[in-house]
Image (cartoon, rainbow, N blue to C red):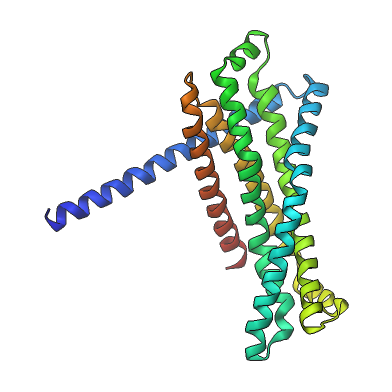
Amino acid sequence: MPAGNYLHMVTGFCGRWIIQKLNRLGEILGFFVVCLKTALRYRTTGQRLMARTFIQQIYFTGVQSLELICIIALLVGGLVVIQGIAQLTRVGSRDVLASLLTVVIIREVGPLLTAVVVILRSGSAIAIEMGYMTVLGEIESIEMQGIDPLHFLAIPRLVGVTLAVISLIVFFNVVSIFGGFVSAWALVDIPFWALFSDLAREVDGIDIIVGSVKALMFGLTIALVCMFHGFRTGDAITNIPPQVSRAMVDCFILCIFFNVLISALFYL
């Protein structure tokens, strides 16, 4: 095959892939707009039932994930400190350990790892649940009762997952920093108060804003993408695994994209 034809084939494949992803992103944004309109239209309807579904979603996404988040956060905090001490000791800059914790955990690793845990644990469950409800005709049954499925199913999950992700990211950062402090104290006998004072000087308002924006974007992305693919399942039950797989991949790609984009906008 001539080199020109091969290059044309590769560029064409990349272009089609990018266009496909952009079209899907546009559909997800349209789904988000429809959810907002539905939330405003029925804002005073079924509040008690909505509150019950909302609390259940927070419990499943947030409370039941605390144990896993705690274990991962402690391990990550300890690993960052161990590697940081090993590398910083070589150059005699152990005083910047608090800065390393701020940059690695609070700004980047904490939000992204928490999003990954929520995607694997709750996002897949939401996509499967919406997929089975679509295939088995439960969505149509809800519509036949005069209830908007988006109002009954999507809005509580959208709000619940978003608030749970925000809370889990804060919890992850706190536990991970505590694990780092314990590791630093155990390895090189650095007092807690010294690390805490250094960390307090390093963390500023921009870090809190960036963390909040990332948490909000990750929560909305996970809930929207998983529900979007769940509702697209169709009538065949064999469509559920492919849609769940697409939901997981799209969530990973979008969360990494938003993580890089937000960090670039605020820190560069």
117 is higher (above) or lower (below) than 178: above
Quarter of the image where the C terminus is located: bottom right
| Most foreground residue, 73 or 39 | 73
Query: Residue at 60% across / 62% down in the picture?
Result: 263
70 is higher (above) or lower (below) than 227: below
Please indicate, yes or no, whether residue 134 appears anywhere in the rendered image: yes
Q: Give coordinates of residue 238: x percent, y percent.
A: 46, 25
| Most foreground residue, 8 or 30 | 8
Q: Residue furthest right?
A: 193
Please indicate, yes or no, whether residue 167 appears anywhere in the rendered image: no
Q: Give coordinates of residue 18: x percent, y percent.
A: 38, 46
Q: Give coordinates of residue 115: x percent, y percent.
A: 64, 50
Q: Residue furthest left?
A: 2
- For residue 88, which quarter of the picture? bottom right
Query: Residue at 70% across / 39% down in the picture?
Result: 161
Q: Residue furthest top?
A: 144
| Most foreground residue, 108 or 239 | 239
224 is higher (above) or lower (below) than 70: above
Query: Residue at 57% across / 16% down in the picture?
Result: 136
Query: Residue at 15% across / 58% down in the picture?
Result: 3
- For residue 209, which quarter of the picture? bottom right
94 is higher (above) or lower (below) than 249: below
Q: Across the whole image, how many numbered discs are drawn on residues? A: 0
Does residue 86 appear left or right of residue 8 in this picture?
Answer: right
Does residue 163 appear left or right of residue 135 in this picture?
Answer: right
